[in-house]
Image (tube, rainbow, N blue to C red):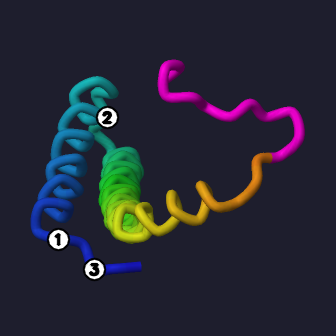
Amino acid sequence: MSRPTLAQLSTGTLTVVVATVALLAVSGSTGVLEVAVLVAFAIALGTLTTALLVTVSAHRTASADAASTRRQSQPQDREQARDQPQSIGQQPELAHQG
């Protein structure tokens, strides 16, 4: 797993702060244990948010790398496909059909 960027950390921190304030406002908790549980939940939510953002970012980077590799090899693939015979039941595409 790659390290989170500043934007991802900021999003996670903002999630913690907003979730904490919202949970405390809605629940009306005043006890130390109740507040501690709500804060722990908000911290877990912020951590999950940051982890998901890092995962999505890594997935996008991998997809972009794969797409650039496909684009580079695509002209060769077309030439190879043109030279290979078509499978049974598959109609050849004619110029006027495209």
Q: Position of residue 77 (x, y in %)?
A: 52, 64
Identify the residue under disc 3: 3
| Amino acid type of the residue that numbered disc 1 sits on in the rendered structure | Thr
Q: Secondary structure at mark 1?
A: loop
| Amino acid type of the residue that numbered disc 2 sits on in the rendered structure | Ser
How far is the residue under mark 2 from the one under mark 3?
Answer: 35 Å
| Amino acid type of the residue that numbered disc 3 sits on in the rendered structure | Arg
Q: Secondary structure at mark 2?
A: loop
Is disc 3 surrounded by few (<14), some (14 to 19) or many (20+) residues within 10 Å?
few
What is the magenta segment's predominant secondary structure?
loop
Image quadrant occupied by the N terminus: bottom left
Q: Quadrant of residue 91?
A: top right
Q: Could you say which disc has been placed on residue 29 in the image?
A: 2
How far is the residue under mark 3 from the one under mark 1?
Answer: 7 Å
**Is residue 37 found left or right of 18 in the rendered image?**
right
Q: Secondary structure at mark 3?
A: loop
Q: Is residue 83 visible?
A: yes
Q: Nearer the viewer, residue 58 or 16?
A: 58
How far is the residue under mark 1 from the one under mark 2?
Answer: 34 Å
The span picked out in magenta is 87-98
Q: Nearer the viewer, residue 61 or 83?
A: 83
Q: Position of residue 92 (x, y in %)?
A: 68, 34
Q: Nearer the viewer, residue 53 or 35?
A: 53
Identify the residue under disc 1: 5
Looking at the image, is 1 positioned above or below residue 35? below
